[in-house]
Image: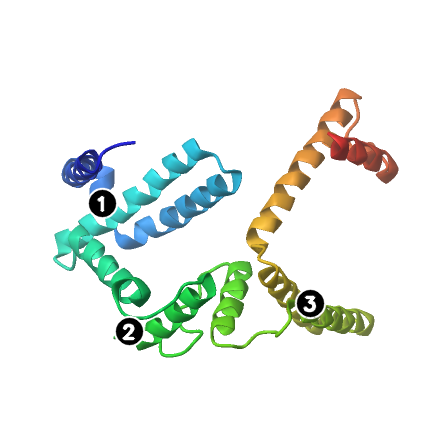
């Protein structure tokens, strides 16, 4: 691992290169906060994918891409005179110190739950901070992630089941309500009830300390791998999937599962 001096030198090198690119590169020079926004979102998802695969080299690479965007935004901010990378770092440091009174103050919190509760209470007191428990959850978050964050914040305010097993009654209730709307053939209500069912299942995942977005992505990748196997085997037999029966594809699917 690198020394602190080497780490600081590497960061200084990055800042120098970023400044040179903004000055000399036509593409970098024309970028704005808005033009970079979608790329930043994509880079964040690529980092999330690497984290899920636990590919350490890929994680390091994708962290670099995300860091590039942080430095890029800070460079633009410095050119407009609004802020620079020092402002970004100092504001983050100030926030971390303020939100960890159990480390930098006289608050006692020796468990993960106690720390999270303290975190939410401190954020409510922050100058210009969130004024309500559910404030601060970005509207742009994917719905699956947003539901988890909503439920987690509600938990920190004491709004939760006393015993996690109680959530299954809620899940069963939502399944019954969804099935009722299926029978009623009301498309709008079906969608609403399916949303309620998903919300309840995400709540169950939270209570059992499962990240539903990670769990779903693992299933996505598993399905892709197995379906690709079916397609490959069909091609080897000189067949197309469209020509195969469901029973034939199911047989190949079972083979894929055993691999």
Q: Return the mark for residue 165.
A: 3
Residue 6 locus on image (x, y percent):
20, 33
Q: Earlier in the sequence, mark 3 or mark 2?
A: 2
What residue would you read off at disc 1?
Answer: 30
Crowd class of label 2 (few under 14; some 14 to 19; many from 20; radius 10 Å): few
Q: Are marks 2 and 1 in contact (CB under 8 Å)?
A: no
Say how the picture is coloured: rainbow
Q: Earlier in the sequence, mark 1 or mark 3?
A: 1
121 or 47: nearer the eye?
121
102 or 256: nearer the eye?
102
Q: Return the mark for residue 126.
A: 2
Horizontal arrangement in the rendering, residue 209 relative to residue 193 (left or right): left
Question: Considering the numbered disc 1 on the image, is that residue within a helix, a strand or a loop?
Answer: helix
223 or 102: nearer the eye?
102
Residue 63 locus on image (x, y percent):
36, 41
Residue 103 locus on image (x, y percent):
29, 62
Q: Return the mark for residue 51.
A: none
* Residue at x-position 22% and y-position 62%: 94
Measured Cα–Cα span from mark 1 to mark 3: 55 Å
Residue 84 can be seen, yes or no: no
Task: State which mark lies toward you, 3 or 2.
Answer: 3
Where, by quadrant of the figure, is residue 124 drawn?
A: bottom left
Measured Cα–Cα span from mark 3 to mark 2: 35 Å
* Residue at x-position 61% and y-position 44%: 218
């Amino acid at each position: 691992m690198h020394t602190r001096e080497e780490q600081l030198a590497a960061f200084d090198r990055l800042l120098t290169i970023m400044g040179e690119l903004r000055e000399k590169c036509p593409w970098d020079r024309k970028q704005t906060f808005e033009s970079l926004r979608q790329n930043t979102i994509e880079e964040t998802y690529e980092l999330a994918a690497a984290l899920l695969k636990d590919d350490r080299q890929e994680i390091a690479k994708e962290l670099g891409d995300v860091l590039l965007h942080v430095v890029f935004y800070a460079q633009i901010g410095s050119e407009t005179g609004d802020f620079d990378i020092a402002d970004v770092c100092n504001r983050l440091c100030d926030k971390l110190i303020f939100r960890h009174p159990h480390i930098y103050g006289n608050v006692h919190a020796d468990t993960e739950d106690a720390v999270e509760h303290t975190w939410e209470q401190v954020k409510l007191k922050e100058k210009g901070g969130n004024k309500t428990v559910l404030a601060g959850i970005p509207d742009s978050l994917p719905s699956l992630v947003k539901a988890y964050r909503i439920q987690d914040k509600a938990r920190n305010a004491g709004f939760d089941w006393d015993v996690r097993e109680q959530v299954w009654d809620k899940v069963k209730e939502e399944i019954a309500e969804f099935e009722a709307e299926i029978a009623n053939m009301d498309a709008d209500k079906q969608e609403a009830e399916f949303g309620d069912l998903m919300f309840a299942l995400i709540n169950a995942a939270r209570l059992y300390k499962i990240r539903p977005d990670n769990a779903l992505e693992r299933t996505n990748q598993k399905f892709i791998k197995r379906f690709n196997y079916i397609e490959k085997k069909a091609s080897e037999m000189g067949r197309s999937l469209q020509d195969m029966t469901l029973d034939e594809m199911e047989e190949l699917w079972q083979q894929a599962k055993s691999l």
